[in-house]
Image (cartoon, rainbow, N blue to C red):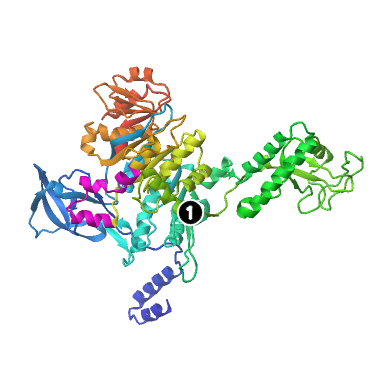
Amino acid sequence: MADLLSMLSEINDADLRARLVAEVTSRGSHRPFGLVFEDTVEELDLVDAPVRRGDRAQYRAGGPERLEVLSVMDGVATLRPMEEGHRGRWLRDIHADSIAVPVADVMVTVDHDSKVYPGLVQTGAAGKTSPGRPTHVAIAGENLHALRALKYTHRASVDLIYIDPPYNTGNKDWVYNDRWVDSNDSFRHSKWLAFMRRRLRLAYDLLKDTGVIIVAIGDDEQHRLRILMDEVFGESNFISNVVWQGGRKNDSRYVSNGADYMLIYAKDESAMGGIDVRWRERRAGVDEILEAAARAWADATGATPAERAQAAELSVKQWQRMQAADHPARSKGLSDYTKIDETGEVYRLKDISWPGGGGPRYDVLHPSTGQPVKVPGRGWIFSNPERMQQEIDAGQIVFGADHHSYINRKSLLTESDSMGPESVFSRKRTGAGAHLRTVLGDKRFPFPKDHEVLMRWIRLAAPSEAVVLDFFGGSGSTAEAVMRLNAEDGGTRQAILVTNNEVAAAEEKKLRKDGHLPGSADWKAKGVFERVTRPRLTTILTGQREDGSTYDSPVDGEHPQRVEFFDLGYVSPRRARLNLEWKRLAPLLWMRGGALGDIPARADEPYVVTDGFAALWGSDHAKALAAELTDQKVVFIVTDSEAEFVAAAKHFDGFECRHLWNDYLGN
């Protein structure tokens, strides 16, 4: 700053010099703290979108050249080269001649802020429909556009978002602008932050006020990501930065950095506090202690309660000794629970004095001697004798042999069987890969998420009827975790999974060498969605692998579950207004209605009724439809006329009414 002001002093024009000094000084005294990065343009390839006049396109075979589509006729696209202008705007190269190529050789390319209209194309399903239980959803496609579609179906409706985005290690772990980003890219961190901010802002809109987002990340970006999430979600909504110690790196020169992180934010922590949300989980070892005590108690049938308690204490102490030797970390916090009362309850002794001192002092008589017991130096924890007597009558006070001994309170294990999760946990990451190999029957995906870790955090952070979203779905671990939790506790959680059908860098190189291009059947078959996600979830739900071999399904129980698979499609606004895009838009209406039952393929009837929603064309049959409705969540009224919509909506008092297709097109 001093050097700059010195240079400004050399300007002869006094007025200009004064104004420049004032401007520089003003800017220099207000340096913002936070992320400063280049908000780069993100280009997205719409591999399956129809190519239309006016689109921007590129060759499927690759290359930097961008093309303007002048016309499409009889399977031939007439194109003209374009060049990139300021901030992603495109200018025509008026000197270039137009060229004609087969339309199959090009694909549509858009900027991240281009207006698109995403829909869904059904591509199959697995599992069994269960009445009243939502169907899980797995979407293959660009997650930025999928999130925009979800803003129509799930705005402020998601309980938990868990994502494991690219860690941006520079090892070709993610694609930006149709190119793998590597460590030599000087804008690598800016691109990643811009990429993440767009998606996190949409994620914020999807969460309920009491919703939570958990983002897994590594060392390369976690410090930047936390500042970005402070910006998007607010510092006051930060919950924790959980450290996952996943193994050792013995070849490290300095420190064995085997940790990854999970950044946890609430959408509105005060809303969670307002309903007294507390995350608790079963303490490891509790069930074993209770089982050891109960077994010994039962085996001593016929003995006195005191004798049965003594036998149970011996059993529990034996278990505690084994735990201390074999699993010292697991026994932490439970080693004092070695006593059994004459009702068979496991407990430990707890201090009965006033915290910090200065508590009340009064006589408490020993039940055998009738004499006052010793009063703790800090006074009693209970404010008056009557309150103390209530605890004595309830059997919660432990007296010594006589009045010369201090007394204690009982802390029952059954009342202390849960605890808040710690911010550091250890679990080897190798187990997730081995599990996925077991499900699929072979190795075809590196470093999947650990479904058991996901189950733990979903169980902690979301209710049993939660909507759980993962828009970096990868191999499908999050959906499997949700399915297993539902099978475990009978919950009605719904998983919504989004993943692009991206092929690995090495696989892409091989495909191009063999003449296969993005969008081709061979290319799609090698993508993560088709090769890993779909077969994994199908196997988990059905117990049968692609090759016909069987897998012991953990979710084929009392409450069947089902998943619908979709490709992200793109809708023409003109065709939507003409009611010609029903097949791509009906899945969105079905999702907004709770993903219950089947997705209707509209026939020629004036209205359709499903388990979760109804759709009405025009207003002539509004009264008849209203008579059929019971507990559907929403009624969609399809009409170009605002007046007709209002007239029809009057028949559906108590139901949410939406005006199609204006409501969708304006989202």
Expressed as whole percent of the image width and height from the top left, the position of residue 167 reads 39, 58
Q: How packed is label 1: few (under 14 Cα within 10 Å), some, or many (20 or more)?
A: many
Q: Is residue 206 visible?
A: no
Residue 555 locus on image (x, y percent): 44, 35
Q: Secondary structure at mark 1?
A: strand
> Is residue 89 rendered to the left or right of residue 429?
left
Q: Is residue 165 left or right of residue 78?
A: right
The reply, left or right, for residue 391 in relation to residue 664 is: right
Q: Is residue 528 magenta?
A: yes
Residue name at image x 12 percent, y 54 percent: 80
Q: Position of residue 335 (x, y in %)?
A: 69, 50
Over which residues does the magenta segment extend?
506-534
Q: Nearer the viewer, residue 428 or 466?
A: 428
Residue 309 at what x, y percent from top left? Answer: 76, 39
Q: Which corner quadrant holds the C terminus?
A: top left
Give the number of callouts. Answer: 1
The part of the image, by quadrant, that contains residue 598 is top left
User: In the figure, 654 relative to 311: above or below?
Assistant: above
The quadrant in which the N terminus is found is: bottom left
Residue 349 is one of the magenta-drawn residues: no
Q: Which residue is mark 1?
A: 262
Residue 412 visible? The answer is yes
Where residue 418 sits, quadrant-wise, is top right
Seen at 23% across and 56% down, the residue is 510
Q: Nearer the viewer, residue 235 or 479?
A: 479
**Please, is residue 330 above or below residue 125 in the view?**
below
- Taking the spot 30% from the left edge, 54% from the top edge, the residue there is 504
Q: Amino acid at mark 1?
A: Met
The answer to whether 457 appears left or right of 97 in the picture is right
Dominant SS of magenta comes to helix
Viewer-nearest residue: 650 or 476? 476
